[in-house]
Image (cartoon, grey):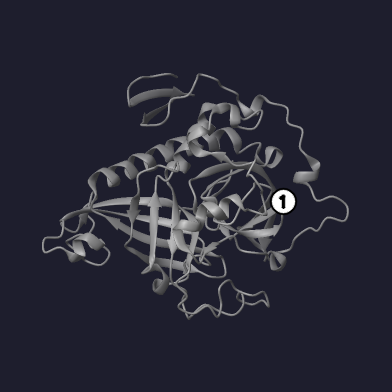
C-alpha cells in the first residue's frame, strides 16, 4: 500500500494496523505460505559426517571486533576481513530493497520487519575489561572471551537491539508507575553534569551479548551509536548505560540506557511500536512454515562500521536437557567480527519478552550460533 503520509492505516485479514514512519515499499506481495520451497539440504540439514551439535558443544569463537587503535582503524579492519573478504553477502542497510530479500520472501511485511529491526539496532562500543570475567564458560573447559585482559581499554565493538522504551515525567511513566530507582530527574551524562537536570527523560532497554558487556565495570565505559546506517550518518551517541541483568551461561545482557533528547526518545518509541506491528504480521505468515523455510536474518555492525543485513537459514535447534523453551540455534546467516550481540531473527518463532536471542559466535566459517533464547 503506497502512501505519502507518515501515518496511515492498513487493513489486513480483518485486522487494522497503524503504521508510522516506515519506509514505503512497492505493492509487491509474495505470501510465503503459497510458495513451494526447496530447501538447500547442504545448508539446512546435517549431511552424513557433518556434526550434529549438542548443547555442550556450542562454544566457538566470539565475534567481538577488537581495535587497539580505536575508531580510526575500523575501516581498515573492515577492508582486511578474513572471514568474508569484500562482504559479498552483507547488504548495506540503506540499500535494502524487496529485491534483496530471498526468493519467495519478497513481501512488504517481512521488509518492514527488517527495516524496524534495523532502526532499533545499535552499535555497542566498550573500552574496559572487567577483572571479574571468568576463565571459562560456566561448567565447561572452553575459554571465556577476554579473560586476563583486566582493565584493558582497547576498543571492542559489537551490536545490540533496543527493546522496551519508557518515558518518565517527574519520576512517573505513562502508566503512572514510579521509577524503578525512585528517581525524579534524568540521570544521563549531560544532566548529571548540569545544575538543572531534565524532569522528562526516556529510558530504554538494549539486548546484547554478555561476553561483549560483562558487568557494570564495563558498562560504565561503554556507549551506543544509534542510526549508524551509512558512513556519513550523524553521530547519535548514548553513553550512560547500566547492566539491568546479565546471564553469562545464556550469553545475553540487558542494559538500561537513558536520554533526555526528546526527538531521540520519540523516534525510538515509534520504531518500537512499528516493530510490534510488523513482527505480529510476519509471525502470522511464517509460524506454520518456519520449520520448512528456516529463514533467519541478522542486522549488525560488522567491524564496528555502518549496519548491514544478512540472510540465511537456521540449521540446528538445540534444547537443554528436557527444557523445551531454552534453546540455542545454529545458522548459516553471515556474520563477522562486530556482530556479537546482534539480534538473531529466526522468522516464525515467538520470543519471550525478557529473553532475546542474540548472536554469540562462530563455529566455523559458514556456521554460527546464538546464545540461549526462550522461544516457542
Q: Is residue 355 visible?
A: no
Residue found 78% across the figure and 47% down from its top: 45
Q: How many marks?
A: 1
Residue situated in front as seen by the camera: 289 or 91: 91
Q: Position of residue 148 (x, y in %)?
A: 55, 80
Name which quarter of the figure residue 60 lies in: bottom right
- Screen quadrant of the N terminus: top left
Instruction: Left or right? Give the position of 54 relative to 288.
Output: right
- Please tell me whether mark 1 sits on a helix, a strand or a loop: loop
User: Residue 319, how many percent across, how many down?
Assistant: 67, 60
Q: Is residue 68 visible?
A: yes
Q: Position of residue 262 (x, y in %)?
A: 23, 46
Q: Is residue 121 above or below residue 187?
A: above
User: Relative to residue 267, is residue 66 drawn left or right?
Assistant: right
Q: Is residue 101 placed above or below 53 in the rendered structure?
A: above
Q: Quadrant of residue 318?
A: bottom right
Crowding at dot 1, Cα within 10 Å, few <14 / some 14-19 / many 20+, comes out as some
Front-lying residue, 71 or 266: 71
Image spot of residue 370 (x, y percent):
61, 57
Residue that appears at 45% across and 41% down: 230
311 or 72: nearer the viewer: 72
Residue at the outermost right position: 48
Q: Which residue is mark 1?
A: 366
Amino acid at each position: 500500500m503506497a502512501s505519502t503520509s507518515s501515518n496511515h492505516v492498513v487493513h489486513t485479514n480483518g485486522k487494522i494496523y497503524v503504521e508510522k514512519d516506515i519506509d514505503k515499499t512497492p505493492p509487491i506481495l509474495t505470501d510465503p505460505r503459497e510458495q513451494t520451497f526447496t530447501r538447500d539440504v547442504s545448508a539446512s540439514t546435517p549431511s552424513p559426517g557433518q556434526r550434529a551439535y549438542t548443547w555442550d558443544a556450542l562454544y566457538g569463537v566470539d565475534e567481538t571486533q577488537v581495535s587497539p587503535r580505536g575508531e580510526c582503524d575500523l575501516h581498515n579492519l573492515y577492508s582486511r576481513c578474513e572471514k568474508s573478504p569484500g562482504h559479498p553477502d552483507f547488504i548495506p542497510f540503506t540499500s535494502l530493497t524487496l529485491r534483496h530479500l530471498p526468493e519467495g520472501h519478497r513481501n512488504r511485511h517481512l521488509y518492514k520487519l527488517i527495516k524496524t529491526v534495523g532502526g532499533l539496532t545499535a552499535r555497542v562500543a566498550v573500552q574496559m575489561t572487567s577483572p571479574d570475567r571468568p576463565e571459562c564458560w560456566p561448567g565447561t573447559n572452553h575459554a571465556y572471551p577476554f579473560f586476563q585482559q583486566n582493565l584493558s581499554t582497547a576498543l571492542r565493538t559489537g551490536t545490540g537491539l533496543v527493546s522496551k522504551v519508557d518515558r518518565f515525567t517527574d519520576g512517573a511513566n505513562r502508566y503512572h508507575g514510579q521509577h524503578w530507582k525512585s528517581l525524579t530527574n534524568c540521570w544521563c551524562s549531560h544532566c548529571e553534569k548540569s545544575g538543572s537536570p531534565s524532569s522528562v527523560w526516556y529510558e530504554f532497554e538494549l539486548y546484547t551479548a554478555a561476553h561483549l558487556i560483562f558487568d557494570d565495570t564495563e558498562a560504565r565505559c561503554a556507549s551506543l551509536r544509534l542510526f549508524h546506517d551509512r558512513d556519513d550518518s550523524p553521530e547519535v551517541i548514548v553513553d550512560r548505560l547500566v547492566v539491568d541483568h546479565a546471564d553469562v551461561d545464556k550469553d545475553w545482557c540487558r542494559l538500561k540506557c537513558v536520554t533526555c533528547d526528546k526527538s531521540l526518545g520519540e523516534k525510538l518509541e515509534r520504531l518500537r511500536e512499528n516493530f510490534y506491528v510488523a513482527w505480529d504480521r510476519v509471525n502470522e505468515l511464517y509460524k506454520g512454515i518456519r520449520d520448512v523455510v528456516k529463514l533467519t536474518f541478522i542486522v549488525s555492525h560488522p567491524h564496528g562500521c555502518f549496519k548491514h543485513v544478512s540472510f540465511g537459514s537456521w540449521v540446528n535447534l538445540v534444547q537443554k536437557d528436557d527444557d523445551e523453551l531454552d534453546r540455542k540455534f545454529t545458522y548459516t546467516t553471515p556474520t563477522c567480527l562486530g556482530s556479537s550481540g546482534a539480534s538473531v531473527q529466526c522468522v516464525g518463532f515467538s520470543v519471550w519478552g525478557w529473553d532475546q536471542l542474540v548472536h554469540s559466535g562462530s563455529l566455523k566459517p559458514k556456521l554460527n550460533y546464538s546464545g540461549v533464547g526462550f522461544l516457542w
